[in-house]
Image: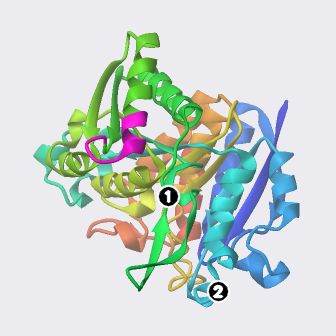
């Protein structure tokens, strides 16, 4: 029986609550599909600051490097907002991406049938089977470029630098092309090549790579137009590949097409099958400890782990199906509608487990 070693970073706020439910589901899936999971619990974010004075302790990095994958809850909260930038919980996220080489962020935006009515976009626009995959470059660009404070014309100023090398663009574009090959064969590369030099290099590089993927239909779109088109006609997209900054913004916009940010999972991948899996919502400290947080995005992150790190497609599909079926009868407060049973975090996790066991 295969055993997978998973480093678990519960994080802050609702993180521990939602991760507990995801682990519960993962254990049941293991029993059903013939594998076991060994968990190594480590600290990252605000909880790590409180315990060690740093958002990403060296022990956490070492544990992650010695595991098959990483499961993360959420980090951050008002308690740590006055700290210097390099000591805030969010610095742990940037640090772990760099330390583990997690350069490819996959953010699916899909509609689950029971939640169609919850989307802020009209039903005739989102269609019946909206399923977009945003492939975001994660360790380059403006978030990792040179930055600082200076003076301009005698006034205080600040700068951030967006820099990309050809190899950085090639490796994320490769993920995009290969993802498109596994789906509908359509890839949209998003940039701002009419203004930014880094985007011109991005487009040149992607165009050159397209010669190696003749089975993929490649298109290009400026980021501002893409933001508009995601609302105007989202079904035109299948796979979107883009830079760190643009992907951060567009993936959050795309997420709202699904009806709730509490439903969306993500994967951050390195070379090979290693990845970090997390829900894209925040730590929600205002509801922490109340037992009402929605664990489904974290459970769906486990489904992505099963698929992309462990190669267990059938197990991943079983989890996704159980989540879909759970919403036919029960809802946590964030997705609640009249006519459904209102449940808490633990009850929703229990329901997914029950459906997996059927």
Instruction: Write the residue at 59% across / 60% down.
Output: 350
**In this picture, residue 18 sits left or right of residue 341:** right
Give the percent coordinates (x, y) of residue 204: 39, 27
Residue 16 in view, yes or no? yes
Image: 15 above or below 183: below
Q: Which residues are magenta?
A: 193-201
Instruction: Write the residue at 38% across / 9% down.
Output: 214
Mark seen at residue 32: none
**In this picture, residue 137 sits left or right of residue 357:** left
Image: 328 above or below 218: below
Q: Residues within 10 Å of mark 1 (few under 14, many from 20)?
A: few
The mark closer to the camera, 2 or 1, is: 1
Instruction: Write the residue at 52% across / 26% down.
Output: 174
Mark seen at residue 83: 2
Image: 157 above or below 128: below
Give the percent coordinates (x, y) of residue 118: 25, 60
Residue 245 among magenta residues: no
Mark seen at residue 161: 1
For marks 2 and 1, the one nearer the N-term is: 2
Residue 357 in view, yes or no? no
């Amino acid at each position: 029986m295969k055993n997978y070693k998973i480093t678990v970073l519960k994080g802050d706020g609702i993180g521990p609550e939602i991760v507990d439910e995801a682990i519960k589901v993962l254990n049941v899936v293991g029993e059903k599909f013939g594998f076991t999971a060994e968990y190594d619990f480590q600290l990252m974010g605000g909880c790590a600051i409180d315990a060690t004075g740093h958002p990403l302790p060296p022990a956490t990095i070492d544990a992650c490097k010695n595991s098959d994958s990483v499961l993360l809850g959420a980090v951050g909260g008002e308690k740590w907002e006055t700290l210097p930038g390099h000591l805030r919980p969010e610095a742990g996220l940037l640090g772990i991406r760099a330390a583990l080489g997690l350069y490819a962020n996959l953010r699916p935006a899909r509609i689950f049938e029971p939640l169609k009515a919850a989307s802020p976009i009209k039903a005739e626009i989102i269609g019946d089977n909206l399923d977009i995959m945003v492939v975001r470059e994660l360790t380059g660009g403006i978030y990792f470029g040179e930055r600082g404070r200076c003076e301009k014309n005698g006034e205080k100023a600040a700068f951030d630098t967006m820099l990309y090398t050809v190899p950085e663009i090639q490796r994320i574009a490769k993920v995009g092309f290969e993802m498109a090959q596994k789906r509908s064969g359509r890839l949209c590369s998003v940039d701002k090549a009419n203004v930014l030099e880094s985007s011109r290099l991005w487009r040149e590089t992607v165009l050159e790579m397209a010669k190696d993927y003749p089975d993929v239909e490649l298109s290009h779109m400026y980021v501002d137009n893409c933001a508009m088109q995601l609302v105007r006609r989202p079904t035109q997209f299948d796979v979107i590949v883009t830079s760190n900054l643009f992907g951060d913004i567009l993936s959050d916009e795309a997420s709202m097409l699904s009806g709730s940010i509490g439903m969306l999972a993500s994967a951050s991948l390195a070379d090979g099958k290693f990845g970090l899996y997390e829900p894209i919502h925040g730590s929600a400290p205002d509801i922490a400890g109340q037992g009402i947080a929605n664990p489904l995005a974290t459970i769906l992150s486990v489904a992505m782990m099963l698929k992309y790190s462990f190669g267990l497609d059938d197990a991943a599909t079983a989890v996704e199906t159980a989540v879909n079926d759970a919403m036919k009868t029960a809802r946590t407060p964030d997705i609640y509608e009249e006519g459904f049973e209102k449940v808490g975090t633990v009850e929703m996790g229990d329901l997914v487990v029950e459906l997996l066991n059927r």
